[in-house]
């Protein structure tokens, strides 16, 4: 059972406009799996789910990369080094480790990029050069962590809606190209639901696992309120069954989901 505890912010980074990365000291969070998240308490006693952007197991540190979209994320972005956060976690089902004998594609969109980076940092070392990365965002300033991938020796393929960096448009043409060249490949992706639905379709023919980390509005984060349910397989006579993103996910196999 996850419990709430306080973690100290060691460092605050500003990777892009409207984004901050809080590096917290917490051996407990540093042991999380990429794709898991923690629920951060914000004023008004509401918690907000944030994925781990990096997991430094040896140093006992974890990263939380936050894009400001509303009052909770704005409050997080205003925090300073030395302050503490009240967190619940690590929560949810993370990514399963990639199969060592298959080519591997990581796809990140917007604030879905941080968990994908955590996966590359955790497992990527054994994969070069069979690890490929595609990152997408609305425009250049929101295309975060490309430089972090380069520090791992990975040159990501970039796409922006407005063409301000990389290919103009979505990540999907690059995903389709990779799938065509790697029929035995495996995929991990995180981003907005329309992107994940398109990745799921593009990767349907792969023989390796396709794991998708969903972003969904949440309440309790621990399986009690059903605020986060999504339709899932198997679809019976009365329609799909429903799964909780906070505890059954956020990472699902593509064949578990109904888009
Ligand atoms: C498992 C999981 C992991 C996440 N990881 C990260 C992360 O690493 N970094 C990060 O910046 N954000 C992440 N998010 C999204 C983040 O939780 C929300 O942006 C945050 O809760 C918004 O809170 P707020 O009070 O700032 O905004 P609110 O005032 O609650 O909402 C502001 C706007 O954002 C929209 N919104 C809020 N939550 C979501 C959501 N979950 N999905 C889509 N739209 C939403 C609202 O509809 C509204 O339009 C994650 C979400 C989930 C479910
Ligand atoms: S957020 Fe409450 S059940 Fe998932």
Image (spheres, rainbow, N blue to C red):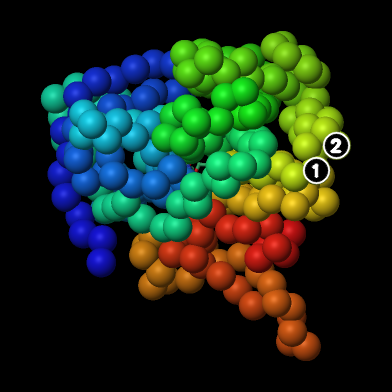
Residue occupying image coordinates x 43% and y 43%: 34
Q: Nearer the viewer, residue 67 or 115?
A: 115
Q: Secondary structure at mark 1?
A: loop
Give the percent coordinates (x, y) of residue 167.
Answer: 78, 17
Image position of 86 with respect to 77: above or below: below
Q: Secondary structure at mark 2?
A: helix
Q: Residue furthest bottom?
A: 237
Relative placement, left or right, of 160 versus 83 is right
Q: Nearer the viewer, residue 62 or 81?
A: 62
Give the percent coordinates (x, y) of residue 194.
Answer: 73, 46
Give me the C-alpha separation between circle 2 and circle 1.
Answer: 6 Å
Image position of 93 with respect to 147: above or below: below
Residue occupying image coordinates x 79% and y 28%: 174
Binning the other alpha carbons within 10 Å of mark 2 as few (below 14), some (14 to 19) or many (20 upward) gives some
Quarter residue 58 falls in: top left
Residue where numbered disc 1 is placed: 183
Q: Nearer the viewer, residue 165 or 105?
A: 105
For the residues labelled 2 and 1, say whether their Cβ atoms are less than 8 Å apart: yes
On residue 180, the disc is 2
Q: Is mark 2 within 8 Å of ligand 1?
A: no
Give the percent coordinates (x, y) of residue 233.
Answer: 69, 72
Residue occupying image coordinates x 61% and y 42%: 101
Give the percent coordinates (x, y) of residue 178.
Answer: 78, 32
Image position of 54 with respect to 47: above or below: above
Quarter residue 106 falls in: top right
Is residue 238 visible in the rendered structure shown here? yes
Which part of the image, by quadrant, shows the N terminus?
bottom left
Residue occupying image coordinates x 61% and y 51%: 211
Relative placement, left or right, of 90 versus 109 is left
Binning the other alpha carbons within 10 Å of mark 1 as few (below 14), some (14 to 19) or many (20 upward) gives some
Q: Nearer the viewer, residue 63 or 97?
A: 97
């Amino acid at each position: 059972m996850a419990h709430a505890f306080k973690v100290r912010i060691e460092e605050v980074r500003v990777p892009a406009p409207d984004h901050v990365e809080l590096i917290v000291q917490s051996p407990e969070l540093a042991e999380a799996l990429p794709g898991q998240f923690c629920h951060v308490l914000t004023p008004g006693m509401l918690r907000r789910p944030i994925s781990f952007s990096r997991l430094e197991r040896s140093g006992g540190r974890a990263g939380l990369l936050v894009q400001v979209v509303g009052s909770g994320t704005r409050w997080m972005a205003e925090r300073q080094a030395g302050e503490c956060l009240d967190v619940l976690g690590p929560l949810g089902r993370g990514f399963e480790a990639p199969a060592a004998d298959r080519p591997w594609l990581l796809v990140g969109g917007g604030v879905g990029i941080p968990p994908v980076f955590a996966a590359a940092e955790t497992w990527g070392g054994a994969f070069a050069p069979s690890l490929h990365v595609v990152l997408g965002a609305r425009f250049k300033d929101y295309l975060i962590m490309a430089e972090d991938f380069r520090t791992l020796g990975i040159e990501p393929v970039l796409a922006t809606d407005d063409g301000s960096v990389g290919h103009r448009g979505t990540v999907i043409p690059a995903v389709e190209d990779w799938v065509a060249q790697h029929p035995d490949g495996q995929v991990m992706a995180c981003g907005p639901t329309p992107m994940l639905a398109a990745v799921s379709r593009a990767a349907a023919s792969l023989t390796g696992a396709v794991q998708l980390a969903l972003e969904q509005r949440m309440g309790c984060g621990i399986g009690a309120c059903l605020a986060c349910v999504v339709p899932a397989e198997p679809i019976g006579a009365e329609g799909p069954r429903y799964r909780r993103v906070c505890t059954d996910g956020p990472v699902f196999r593509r064949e578990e989901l109904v888009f």
